[in-house]
Amino acid sequence: GFCQQLERASGNDSLAQIIPNSLEMALSPISDEARVITQSKAPFPIVSVNEAWTRVTGYTQVDVEGKDLSILNGRETKEKNSDIESVAKGQCSCSVNVHYDVNGRDFFSFVCSYPLTNLKNEVTHLLHVFQELP
């Protein structure tokens, strides 16, 4: 849908993909996408990260469980709380930002965030897919 069009418009056709819409689908061991899943309610604590996300950020599941994505923020990060709040309401959001890994190394990342819903179509979790940019 619309998020896939946004990804294509970003100039990286390899990002155009099937987007999981449930927690079960998002947790499936798939490809090498750097994925982090948060709860859908503020302060949006992290519930799951995959190995690819650990490779990009240096943070493990144990390091981040229960914390929020601000652990990646630093001096140059432009924080936009409205983005994550709109995803929690059922919209997708993509952005480019400066983030920092566990050692303080800064990197540009293209992040797309998607709502994950249950059988009642209620947003229960948020999927954030990170791609480190050159």
Image: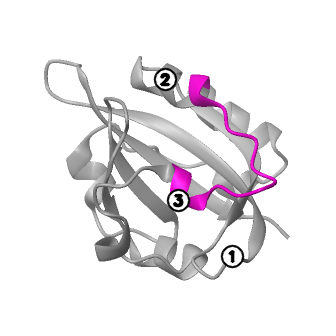
Q: Which residue is mark 1?
A: 104
Instruction: Report the residue at 73% width, 77% height from top.
Output: 105
Residue 78, compared with residue 32, is above or below; it is above
Residue 87, compared with residue 108, is above or below; it is above
Instruction: Kindly state the secondary structure of the residue where label 1 is placed.
Output: loop
Q: Residue furthest left?
A: 119
Badge nearest the viewer, 2 or 3:
3
* Left or right placement of residue 126 versus residue 9 in this view: left
Residue 57, compared with residue 103, is above or below; it is above
Label 2 to label 3, Cα distance in Å? 18 Å
Q: Amino acid at mark 3?
A: Ile
Q: Which residues are magenta?
A: 70-82
Label 2 to label 1, Cα distance in Å? 26 Å
Q: Which residue is mark 3?
A: 71
Instruction: Kindly state the secondary structure of the residue where label 2 is placed.
Output: helix
Residue 25: x %, y % from top left: 27, 50
Instruction: Report the residue at 14% width, 25% height from top.
Output: 119
The answer to whether mark 1 and mark 3 are in CB contact below 8 A is no
